[in-house]
Amino acid sequence: MKTFMEAMDFRHACKLFDESKKISKEDFEFILEAGRKSPSSFGLEHWHFLVITNDAIKAALRPVCWDQWQITSCSHFVVLLAKKPCWFEKESEYLQKSFNRKAGGDHKRVEMVNAVFDNFLKKDLKPSVEDWSKMQVYIASANMMTAAAVLGIDSCPIEGFNYDAFEETLSKNVLIFDKEKYSIAYAVCFGYRAKEQTKQLRLAMDEIVTFVE
């Protein structure tokens, strides 16, 4: 892909992947790096990426994902986890390490950031903390899908699944998934399209943009 907009034109929600084609380690690390470097509220990096290439695990997950073909035909199936509220409690070691890093170890700045964050959670945050965390994960996943398109790699975001069954199946098959610490935001399939995609359809610019001058 020569330009950013070419990558955007290339990207589709691919419904059928070529099972014979696998993404190289180098290319997938590029995609993950795009997720890792994504912006997040208060710099808290709310995400954890479960990268599943094991065919048996993908096959186990497919029935709880509306039996979508993408799950088993893709090269890499990524489950995007969001940190639960326990990570963001005032006494959380993770929270304080993050704020110390952000403040460069300056104690007064750490106290200031803590005060601002506490006010944000108590007064200004409208969704639940868990939903807010999931919203941050969506930012990372969008960057990952665009990064994939830059390389000519396809993707398909997956929100069609039975949440409880998906969580239970993951917990049985993936030991790293701790339900007390993470919730499932959603998932993304990555791979190579098996056939050409249909024309990309979008609303006209004047239907979605209002300039306030």
Image (tube, helix red, strand yellow):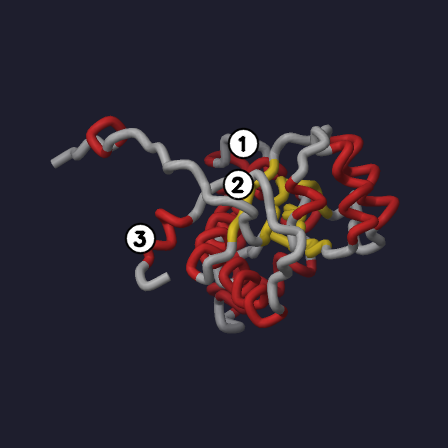
Q: Is label 3 in a helix, a strand or a loop? A: helix
- The answer to whether mark 1 and mark 2 are in CB contact below 8 A is yes
Residue at horizontal 59 percent and vertical 36 percent from the top: 131
Residue at horizontal 61 percent and vertical 50 percent from the top: 18
Residue at horizontal 49 percent and vertical 72 percent from the top: 104
Residue in the foreground of this view, choosing between 74 and 212 = 74
Q: Where is residue 105 in the image (x, y as percent from the top left)?
A: 53, 73
Type of residue at label 1?
Pro
Q: Name the residue under label 3.
A: 5
Residue 190 is at least partly visible in this image: yes
Q: Residue furthest left?
A: 213
Q: Answer left or right for 68 relative to 138.
A: right
Type of residue at label 2?
Met
Residue 116 is at least partly visible in this image: no
Answer with mark 3 or mark 2, whichever residue precedes in sequence: 3
Residue at horizontal 59 percent and vertical 41 percent from the top: 16
Residue in the foreground of this view, choosing between 88 and 2 = 2
What is the spatial separation of the Cα atoms under label 1 and label 2, in whole angstroms?
Answer: 10 Å
Q: Position of residue 35 (x, y in %)?
A: 53, 58
Q: Position of residue 14 (x, y in %)?
A: 53, 42
- Front disc: 3 or 1: 3
Q: How dense is the environment of label 3, judged by Cα within 10 Å: few (below 14), some, or many (20 and up)?
A: few
Give the numbered dot on residue 43. none
Q: Name the residue under label 2.
A: 135
Q: Mark 1 points at which residue?
A: 127
